[in-house]
Image (cartoon, helix red, strand yellow):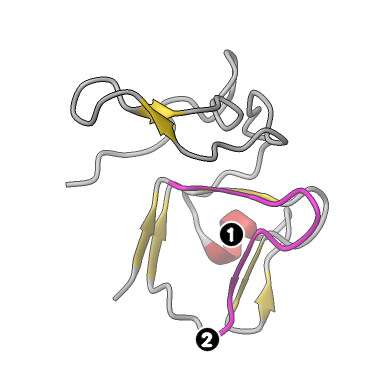
Amino acid sequence: MFEFKNNIVYYAGGVALTDSRGQITSHSNNIFYGGSKALPRSNGIDYNLSDLVSGYEPTASNGDPLFTNPAILPTGCTGTYGKDKAPNSDGLSLRKGSPEIKSGIAVI
């Protein structure tokens, strides 16, 4: 079983997630953003905005996560492990007002 929880899958140009053999068997509280295209594609089925929640994942979201600047991706980290280690770019940080802040669940 492969569990896929509390992720933001972002690809503004097309299919946000492809699971061609349906191997993701458990998924919840994920955010799929693929512009106006199909969001996830699982086992040969494309799930669009209209059937994402009803057909693929009841706890899914499909809104723009409002990244600070997705064009500036981190290329490494700064800081000290266990103290203040962080990505060297905040491009994938969520802006204030993002609907995705605190939308995940606790994973044990």
Q: Which mark is residue 54?
A: 1
User: Does the magenta run of residues contain 92?
Assistant: no
- Residue 74 image point, x, y percent: 55, 36
Q: Residue, x 73% and y 53% (percent of image)?
A: 49
**Which quadrant would residue 65 be assigned to in this image?**
top right
Q: Residues within 10 Å of mark 1 (few under 14, many from 20)?
A: few
Instruction: Establish if 101 lies above or below 106.
Output: above
Picture quadrant where residue 14 is located:
bottom right
Q: Closest to the observer: 17 or 38? A: 17
Residue 81 horizontal/vertical position (percent) = 23, 31
Quadrant placement of the N terminus = bottom left
72 sits left or right of 20 in the view = right
Magenta span includes 15: yes
Q: Is residue 84 depicted above or below 55 in this figure?
A: above
- Along the horizontal axis of the image, is 79 left or right of 44? left
Span colored in magenta? 7-20
Comes first in the chain, label 2 or label 1: 2
Q: Are marks 2 and 1 in contact (CB under 8 Å)?
A: no
Q: Is residue 95 left or right of residue 27?
A: right
Q: Is residue 52 above or below residue 108?
A: below
The numbered dot on residue 28 is none
Which kind of residue does numbered mark 1 sit on? Ser
Kind of residue sitting beneath label 2:
Arg
> Looking at the picture, how far across and down is residue 58, in whole percent?
49, 54
Q: Where is residue 95 drawn, in percent x and y?
A: 60, 18
* Residue 21 image label: 2
Residue at 48% of width from left, 49% of height from top?
30
Q: Give the residue at x 68% y 35%.
A: 70
